[in-house]
């Protein structure tokens, strides 16, 4: 008898400056996702804290730091706060479409504006059109790009104000990367809305989790993930409940 797929080969990157914590260095362990069983492998690795980037699955492997923690929202138990209810109500007129993973210039221009507003000088700031196309289109798994548009005018599609590259895994939705109009005067909280929309989508599909990536202790950029509880983190004994705000305190 033969195994359903060959055990993957793992590699480790060289240390690089950490994008989240000053003075720290990051190192990643990664493997390639390819072949007919790429989805099954991605699902299995996702349950042990790996994330996907194009055709690669990776996770932090920093010998002197364990600040990065894989987190996921428990979909059926999520209850929006008063502020979150107002964000849902404010954006309920948006037209949301799950599109094939195909890049467009409209998406790319929105990404450029988002990076300039929220992450100037960051690691993605030099991304060109081809880099963006690779990010979206190079996927060996079940992937969509979810578009968020303002209401259409007649037959003309509304303005694109948000997007999220999303994988559907066996036990949940994995939010690979989201971006939006961070300067939209009439729609503050768009990033929060996109996460809540994914929670509602997962609930409608009968999926128990939304994977939010890594929560990083001490990083203000990652603090927003605490708002979408109950949250589970990946620990040595498996996935366990935790309160990010209590840990940070």
Image: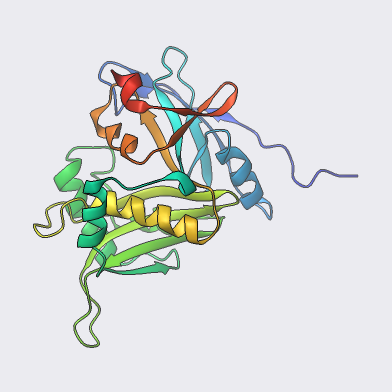
Residue at the spot 36% in from the left edge and 57% down from the top edge: 197
Residue 175 is situated, as x and y percent measured from the top left of the image, at 42, 49
Rendering quarter of residue 224? top left
Q: Which colour scheme is used?
A: rainbow
Q: In which quarter of the image is the C terminus?
A: top left
Residue at the spot 78% in from the left edge and 47% down from the top edge: 4
Rendering quarter of residue 86? bottom left
Residue 140 is situated, as x and y percent measured from the top left of the image, at 56, 55
Placement of 12 over or under 181, stated as above or below? above
The answer to whether residue 53 is seen in the rendering is: no
Q: How many numbered callouts?
A: 0
Placement of 20 over or under 118, stated as above or below? above
Placement of 152 over or under 21, stated as above or below? below
Placement of 28 over or under 35, stated as above or below? above
Q: Nearer the viewer, residue 135 or 78?
A: 78
Residue at the spot 55% in from the left edge and 40% down from the top edge: 46
Q: Which residue lies furthest to the right in this view?
A: 1
The answer to whether residue 200 is seen in the rendering is: yes
Q: Nearer the viewer, residue 53 or 152?
A: 152
Residue 34 is situated, as x and y percent measured from the top left of the image, at 62, 50
Q: Nearer the viewer, residue 36 or 215?
A: 215
Residue 85 is situated, as x and y percent measured from the top left of the image, at 26, 53
Q: Which residue lies furthest to the left in this view?
A: 185
Q: Quadrant of the N terminus?
A: top right
Q: Residue furthest bottom?
A: 154
Rendering quarter of residue 18? top left
Horizontal relation, residue 63 to residue 164: left or right: right
Residue at the spot 18% in from the left edge and 37% down from the top edge: 121
């Amino acid at each position: 008898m033969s195994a359903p797929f060959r055990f993957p080969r793992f590699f480790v990157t060289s240390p690089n400056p950490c994008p989240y914590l000053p003075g720290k260095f990051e190192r990643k362990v990664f493997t390639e996702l390819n072949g007919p069983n790429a989805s099954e492998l991605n699902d299995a690795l996702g349950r042990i804290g790996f994330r996907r980037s194009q055709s690669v699955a990776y996770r932090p492997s920093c010998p002197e730091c364990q600040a990065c923690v894989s987190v996921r929202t428990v979909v059926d138990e999520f209850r929006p706060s008063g502020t979150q209810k107002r964000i849902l109500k404010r954006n309920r007129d948006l037209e949301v479409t799950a599109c094939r993973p195909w890049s467009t210039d409209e998406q790319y221009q929105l990404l450029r504006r988002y990076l300039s507003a929220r992450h100037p000088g960051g690691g993605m700031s030099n991304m060109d059109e081809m880099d963006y196309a690779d990010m979206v289109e190079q996927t060996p798994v079940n992937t969509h790009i979810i578009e968020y548009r303002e209401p259409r005018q007649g037959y003309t599609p509304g303005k694109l104000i948000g997007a999220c590259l999303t994988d559907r895994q066996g036990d949940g939705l994995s939010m690979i990367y989201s971006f939006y109009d961070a300067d939209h005067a009439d729609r503050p909280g768009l990033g929060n809305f996109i996460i809540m929309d994914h929670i509602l989508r997962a609930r409608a599909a009968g999926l128990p989790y939304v994977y939010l990536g890594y929560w990083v202790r001490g990083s203000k950029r990652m603090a927003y993930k605490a708002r979408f509880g109950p949250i589970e983190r990946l620990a040595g004994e498996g996935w366990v409940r935790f309160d990010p705000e209590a840990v940070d305190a």
